[in-house]
Amino acid sequence: MFGSTRSGANAYATVGVETGVAAASPHKLIVMLFEGAMVAVASAQHHMQTGDIAAKGKAISHAISIIDNGLRASLDKKVGGEIALNLDALYEYMSNRLLTANLKNQPQTLDEIYQLLKGLKGAWDAISPASGASAEAAAQPAAAPAPGQAQAYDPLAPQPSRLMKA
């Protein structure tokens, strides 16, 4: 009567992704592209193991599309210089390896590409503008409370050690 639970969950997930994309910074969009490509490669690995050839091909095609039309297309080779050119070559390599993995049914190649994507995503996460702001805030000493004012409890603040020395 109201449709399947699966279609409802898919619609909810689609709205979540669309909302995330609309609200995301350019940096977060790149992270989302890496995550999407990693999910597609992992899905292809699963379908390769279960022998679902059509689903494997679809997942690999999706990963290639994310890499070529998302990650590669977002590179600005004029501004990015050598780094952008190197990333472009790496993305091209990944797309070619994914094609080979699909044609020759090579799970180890899918794992190779997954690990490359994971490493690039980790590097991208490390240069997050949000993590830079947090690191700067953490490096600043906390302001002392004004006289007569109680200091608020901060669960993330360093706590004195309660260990006794022998």
Image (spheres, helix red, strand yellow):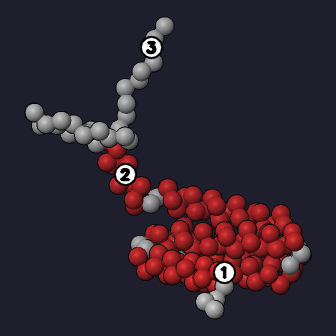
| Badge nearest the viewer, 1 or 3 | 1
| Residue depicted at x 83% and y 63% | 108
Q: Where is residue 116 in the image (x, y as percent from the top left)?
A: 68, 63
Residue 110: percent from left, percent from top: 78, 68
What residue would you read off at disc 3?
164
Toward the viewer: 86 or 122? 122
User: Crowding at label 3, few (<14), some or many (≥20) Cα neighbours within 10 Å?
Assistant: few
Q: Left or right: where does residue 152 sit relative to residue 12?
A: left
SS for callout 3? loop
Q: What residue type is labelled 2?
A: Ser
Q: Marks 2 and 1, how far apart in space? A: 39 Å
Q: Is residue 3 above or below residue 47?
A: below
Residue 99 seen in the current view: no
| First along the sequence among labels 1 and 3 | 1
Q: In this view, does 84 lie above or below 161?
A: below
Q: Point out the tag, 2 or 1, that comes first from the N-terminus.
A: 1
In what element is the residue under mark 1?
helix
- In the rendered structure, find residue 6 and report the number of the disc placed on it: 1
Task: Note whether residue 129 is visible.
Answer: yes
Disc 3 to disc 2: CB gap under 8 Å: no
Gap between marks 3 and 2 measured at Cα: 32 Å
Which amino acid lies under the numbered mark 3 shown in the image of this protein? Answer: Met
Q: Is mark 2 on a helix, strand or loop?
A: helix
Residue 47: which quarter of the image?
Answer: bottom right
Label located before the other in sequence (3 or 2):
2
Q: Toward the viewer: 32 or 149?
A: 149
Residue found at x 37% / y 30%: 159
Q: Residue 134 carries which label?
A: 2
- For the point 66% across and 68% down, the residue is 38
Q: Which residue sits furthest top?
A: 166
Q: State the quadrant of the N terminus.
A: bottom right
Q: Please give left or right for residue 35 compared with residue 24 in the image.
A: right
